[in-house]
Amino acid sequence: MADMSRPASAVPWRTGIAGLAGFAAGLGCVAQMPSLPALACIVLVSSTGLPMWWLEWHRHRRVLPIVGAPCGPSRGLQERRKWRLRGLMAGAPLWLATLSLLPAADPYLISGFWGALAMLWPVLLAGLAVYVWRPSKTGPDGLELAGRWLSQRLHDQQIASGSFPWHVLRDHLIKAFFLPLMLAAAYGWAESADPWQTDTRLQWYYGGVALILLLDTTFATIGYLTTSPRLGAQVRSSNPDWLAWIVTLACYPPFFTWLQRSGFTYRDGIEWIDWLGISHVLIPLWGAAILALMAITALSTVVFGVRFSNLTHRGIVTHGPYRWTKHPAYLSKNVAWWLISVPFVSQAGAATALTHCAILLGMNLIYWARAKTEECHLGRDPAYREYAAWIARHGLLAHMLRPLRKRIHAYGTS
């Protein structure tokens, strides 16, 4: 099957490219600004997001997907406004509870989120007012569904609690957890304008790490900010599997922090630079390999445009790194950890090094479980099954195994 038969991507290339151009322009603006991390973070998110939002709105403005149930001619504007307001009231405790949990492991974990919010609260209030006052032309969706259920329950006590749209709160729990984390991370990397320059010979490496992680977290922040059906970026479904939640949350603070405190750590302070030494001949090659793997991880986020999100299905992406494997971010990230932390090297001896290797293998196994639970969730969509079948025939592993298969076939027919 020719490469042209590859399944179409839900997000076109031009969306990610427009975001990259906006990110570069934002970096140019930030470089001329005083050292204000919150403002720099806001500028980068805005400059990166605006061109992508415009492109996606222009692409979807004539074909708005119908989300949820049609509101019908008997549903007035005032009634839908009440639904949205009550939906916000239903979602507020969930957001407050999540924002209280996140600093449990580290009081400064989402300090960058609060720093950005301190500058953006007028915009947030205006956005909430527009959300309530201007319901979408599609049917009720998101928190409006929760508000509709609450309104109906007020008038009819016989309505079953089982009919409550729990998937809506699940969608918002994902956003309430990951949006502060990603925005705070972007804030932190925006603050690192002069990152760790302990030796000018390694400035290219540390600067590259900071830039790549800033790019990755900026696009991730935009993904969690953008769930509007007007942009085709709505959550089609969130993963209901409890195992998927466990293995995903285990990779992020505060849960990963708690794991580390309990002994689940694969390093003792030695990293690849300490192992090789500043002047080692392999330094440029080893550092370049790490940056290349990190770049693949970031590019795997960029190609989602405004749709990146954990634990959700928001459209199948088939280009960029996803042209070669179903999980390029997980694969590149896990290989990079081995190169960065060199767990096979330890000051405490071979036994400790083996323990560190086993723990990092355990971390790799968690990501393997994440990949499998994602495939199970996305596999309910025929588009993903078509993409998975295409990767099985034309992906990176298929290309690597093809010569071996030819040899086996030639041996069998000889």
Image (cartoon, rainbow, N blue to C red):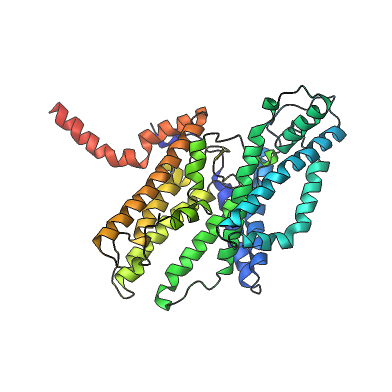
Tell me where residue 82 appears, x and y as whole percent: 83, 36
Coordinates of residue 57 in the picture (x, y in percent): 68, 43
Left or right: where 108 falls relative to 331: right
Residue 146 visible at all: yes
Locate the N terminus by quadrant: top left
Q: Nearer the viewer, residue 405 or 111?
A: 111
Marks counted in the figure total 0
**Which quadrant, please, contains the C terminus?**
top left
Q: Is residue 19 visible?
A: no
Instruction: Name the residue: 40% across, 58% down.
Output: 292
The residue most toward the top is 158
| 316 to the left or right of 288 | right
Residue placed at 48% from the left, 30% from the top? Answer: 379
Q: Position of residue 326 (x, y in %)?
A: 43, 40
Residue 380 locus on image (x, y percent): 51, 28
When the figure is inspected, residue 254 is found, relative to residue 82, above or below; the finding is below
Against 272, is 413 above or below? above
Q: Is residue 152 left or right of residue 219?
A: right
Figure check: 196 above or below 86: below
Q: Quadrant of residue 66?
A: top right
Q: Nearer the viewer, residue 307 or 175?
A: 175
Q: Based on the displayed image, in which of its 4 quarters is residue 356 positioned? A: bottom left
Q: Is residue 413 above or below residue 113?
A: above
In percent of the image, x 71 and y 42: which residue is there?
91
